[in-house]
Image: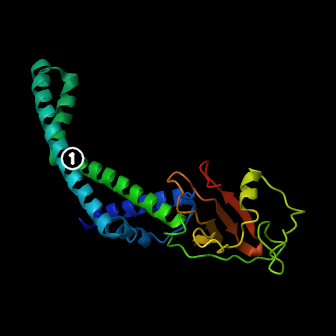
Amino acid sequence: MLSVFGIFLYFLGWIYRWAYFGFFQLQITSLTFPIESFFIVPIQAILGDFWIFIRASLVLLITIALIQFTIWLISCVRAKFVRKLHKKTRNFFLLKFLRSFVKFLSLPLSHEIIAVAWILAALFWLGRWQGEADAYRDAVNITSTRPIATLVSPNDKMALGRNLDDLLINPPLKGFRIIGDVEQFRQIFGREVNDTTNLKEPLLWRLLIENDSWVYLFPGMPREAKLNQRPPVLAVNKSDGQIQLLILSHPKILP
């Protein structure tokens, strides 16, 4: 029983992280997490706050009702089907196997399969809803729980950034090449440092996650950002001191 419960917890934790980092255009398979952390993440999707707990409780009640209804429906259909099949194919050899299979489904195992299927479906949507909701919360500056980040690198290691000795002058970009959409680069160029002059909507760079040799940064979005908008994410590789930069964005990227 505990092993089955652990599988459900792990599944919910995996779906939550898949939805959360998918919001920022990151595949969870490209990140590394301790296995035990997937058993802790579901706490946020179930007990994050009062309303999250209420929603999880409603999902549980609906799932139980759907399991019972599905079992009852299949039992009714199966009983009617077995009676008709037995009358028409009583002595037909090739359909004896089909009758045996129908009898097999009458065992409690079929009930367990139905229950597991509905539970996994409920956990999938519960984890996805909460993961996307938390990701949007963290992407918007006014509600974000992600720490404000500062990345410092040598001048010859990264194309984006400002010279510490002269923040008003654009750094020279000679000797650098670009692959992809130049507009992504231009949208971030000139906005590399935090701007708190606008108290209502400050520009704040935040740390999404540091994983292995990669650091993922993003600029927080304003409060009026829509649910289908995404901030650009800078993936910075800092291995061996050779900093590489990758810009991840979405068609609904905030201008």
Q: Which residue is mark 1?
A: 66
Q: Looking at the picture, tell me which residue is in the foreground, 74 or 132.
A: 132
The quadrant where residue 87 appears:
top left
Q: Residue at x 45, y 69 (%)?
A: 35
Is 70 situated above or below 229? above
Q: Residue 209, image x and y in percent? A: 57, 70
Mark 1 nearby-residue class (10 Å; few <14, some 14–19, many ≥20): some
Is residue 117 visible from the viewing direction of this image?
yes
Q: Is residue 52 left or right of residue 171?
A: left
Is 109 situated above or below 221? above
Q: Residue at x 66, y 74 (%)?
A: 197
Is residue 211 visible from the viewing direction of this image?
no
Q: Residue furthest bottom?
A: 165
Q: Residue 40, image x and y in percent? A: 38, 72
The quadrant where residue 88 appears:
top left
Q: Secondary structure at mark 1?
A: helix
The quadrant of the image that shows the N terminus is bottom left
Question: Type of residue at label 1?
Answer: Leu
Q: Residue 41, image x and y in percent? A: 40, 69
Q: Residue at x 65, y 55 (%)?
A: 255
